[in-house]
Image: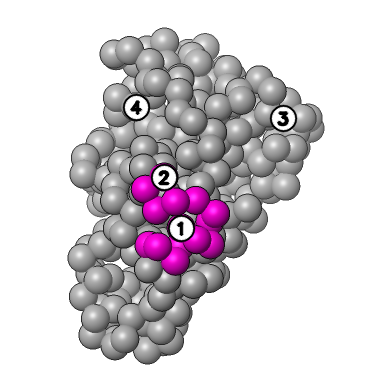
Amino acid sequence: MALPSDALVSRLLRRDAPDNYFIGANARCFRSVRQVTLFARCPLFVPTADLHNRFVLILGIGQGTAVACGERVHVIGPGQALLVPPFTLHRYAQLREEPQPLAFVGFASDMGDDAPDGVASVGLDTGVVPVSAEAWQVLDQLEAACDARPALLPALTLQLLELLAEGAPGAAGQPVEHADWARTQRVAQVARHHPAFAVHELARACGASEGVLRSAVLEITGMPIARFMRQIRLQHTFALVARRQFAAAAERAGYATPEAYAKAFKAEIGIAPAQFASLAADNGWRIRPKPVPG
């Protein structure tokens, strides 16, 4: 394990505080070629919740942060990294009194000809991995390329992932069918627009059989399609909840009553909608609805 240089940490922190907290859509390099984005921030509160349709590589540049990812809790210390797959609900919890910064590299599952199936075969599914000095050098190049040579971002990102995989225990993961990625993306899109759809209606809208769709979502997300749809629909209401528009949030998510919505929200996110809204107000979140994957 190696530590990043002070100069790199300083440059990463200058990319802090994307305007949309949940996806970093306004990080300076977000519109770069093939959608690789880089930014840094300090998760400030417990618990937060995030779910996205992109891979996110989290790198420890502070003194330690806990990340609950699915059913597992990982502690990312300085000089360590964790890859969070798409459609995986995860939360952050500080281990120290002062918020600790993390760097984030977000990228699509398909970055072009160099990585036709994303990083499914890179082998970073084993949890926290050490970051070597060589890997920090590549991240340094990636940060510089954000503004100067964005066309280099996919190749540099893949190089960084391969270096991290060299230090990861266990065998590389098995590639997944690209069609499963596309179907899962489509499920997320339709679930946001049609929250009342049952699974068979969702399958019809996605142009696949119910069995094929269930299998694809389970393969990509590791969860049944009903739970995945519930998480997608709840996340799509974060902006309304932050503004305490609970009835509107329940309607958007397809729940008959705010009470039913609140019960589902707490079960998935870990806190009640009112607590979420209080945290948003206390910490100055600037939350907008996430764009539909596409």
| Residue type at numbered disc 3 | Ala
Spatial CA distance of label 2 from label 1 is 9 Å
Q: Is label 4 in contact with label 3 (beta carbons under 8 Å)?
A: no
Q: Mark 4 points at which residue?
A: 125
Comparing 31 with 100, the one in front is 31
- Identify whether 284 is placed above or below 109: below
Q: Is residue 175 left or right of residue 75?
A: right
Spatial CA distance of label 3 from label 1 is 41 Å
- Identify whether 108 is placed above or below 94: above
Q: Tell me the number on the disc at residue 212.
A: 2
Q: Mark 1 points at which residue?
A: 203
Comparing 191 with 124, the one in front is 191
Q: Which residue is drawn at 45% across and 28% down?
A: 176
Comparing 79 with 73, the one in front is 73
Among the 4 quarters of the image, the one containing residue 250:
bottom left
**Mark 4 burial class by Cα count in 10 Å: few <14, some 14-19, many 20+:** many
- First in sequence: mark 4 or mark 1? 4
Is disc 4 placed on a helix, strand or loop? loop
Spatial CA distance of label 2 from label 3 is 40 Å
- First in sequence: mark 3 or mark 1? 3
